[in-house]
Amino acid sequence: MSIADTTISAARPTWLALDKLGVLIAFIAAAGAALPFALFRANRIVPGEARSLLTALPELPAILLAAVLLIGFGTALLRFPIIAKLAVGFVVLAVLLAFIGWSGSYLTPEGDTFARVSPGAGFWLLVFAFALLVTDALTRLRFAPLVRIGILVVVAAAMALLLWSGSWNDLSMLKEYATRATAFWAEARTHMALAFGSVAIASVAGLPVGILCYKVKPVRAAVLNVLNIVQTIPSIALFGLLIAPLAWVAANVPGASDIGISGIGVAPAMVALFAYSLLPIVSNTVVGLQSVSPAAVDAAKGMGMTAAQRLMGVELPLAFPVILTGIRIVLVQNIGLATIAALIGGGGFGVFVFQGIGQTAMDLVLLGAVPTVALAFAAAVVLDAAVEMTSRGGRR
């Protein structure tokens, strides 16, 4: 390279260089812009008619959306400051979410109660691309845990405001919700009871078992091997295997059916989710206790603390971030697995997913899938922040 080339390279602004992840994000966004932005259906089950970004909206809003996407494309592609990438990512996502609702109103004929407008593949790819941009920016900025939770609360409040405003009411997913609002919230309560309840029960049972495995090595090998076997059983198979024994218990044990135990329904779903939860909690308890510094334990011994006092006052508090990481893994896992409980009458958001599959109504599938994904994401963010705050030196 000549001296002149070196001088030009040094004088070039750093933001003109390409961002490696930004190239991937820009590629996904470009693919999303080329694919259908929305789908129009004459009714809920017929194949959709693809509408591009420019035909799914009135002319001026379509041009505005294209301009915003172009700015987002350039911001992702080049090495702009990370805070600028975060701000632009949020703005593009907000515009996309607002304009897909506008598209629903624009494409639905006035007075037509049968027509359905759904987000197209292009919309979902664009949302994915700029959500990836926001996630990458948040990771690189390394905000404190409470700041991340605050951002999550603000995003949730903005989504709630968007839904409350009615701007999405002409989208097919909201029309599916309007006819099933009571059932939706009933299944939401069931889904959360299955996911959070199974994790709570597994935590109460798994923590003492983990402590026992840490203290007694022969027990550790036997217990972890059994839990590993349970973990390898496919979820649908485990749900099915529990039907016969629980049906027998309900029929032969006095009072069992009165408290809700049966071959199908919530009981086998809860038992299966509990079984899946044990391995991460027990193994993380063992790993966490093993990672406690011997110097801390020796110092506690030197202070005259008993074994129980050392366990409760020193070892468990120091191991807690690792244990909480196991609980985080289990909770996110169970929020997803609870969807399958609908196959055995357990309820939850899976009811809408499998109803939608049976009726070839993809918007009904989304009515169950989108809240599940959002709930899992929120749980992961909150528990990740909690793990960091409970770790030694974790920022608040």
Image (tube, grey):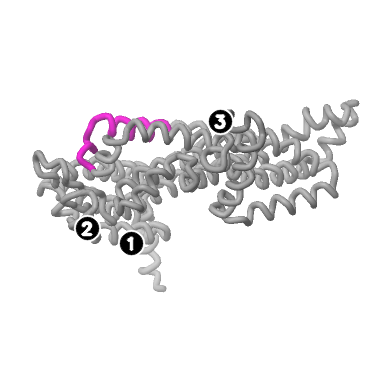
Q: Splitting the image into 4 quarters, where does residue 306 fall?
A: top right
User: Can you identify the residue that label 2 sits on?
Assistant: 47
The outermost residue toward the front is: 252
Within 10 Å of disc 3 (Cα), the crowding (few <14, some 14-19, many 20+) is some
Residue at the farthest bottom position: 1
Measure the C-alpha gap from mark 1 to mark 3.
36 Å
The answer to whether residue 268 of the structure is visible from this angle is yes
The relative height of residue 193 versus residue 31 in the rendered view (above or below) is: above
| Principal secondary structure, stretch drawn in magenta | helix
Quarter of the figure with residue 198? top right
* Magenta stretch bounds: 153-171
Q: Nearer the viewer, mark 3 or mark 2?
A: 2
Q: Nearer the viewer, residue 34 or 281?
A: 281
Q: Please state the horizontal and vertical placement of residue 95, each as a whole percent of the image.
A: 25, 42
Residue 305 sits in quarter: top right
Residue 13 appears in the picture as rendered: no
| Residue 41, above or below 165 | below
Q: Of label 3 and label 2, which has the lower sequence position?
A: 2
Residue 46 x, y percent position in the rendering: 21, 55
Kindly indicate whether the residue at mark 2 contacts the one at mark 1 (C-beta within 8 angstroms): no
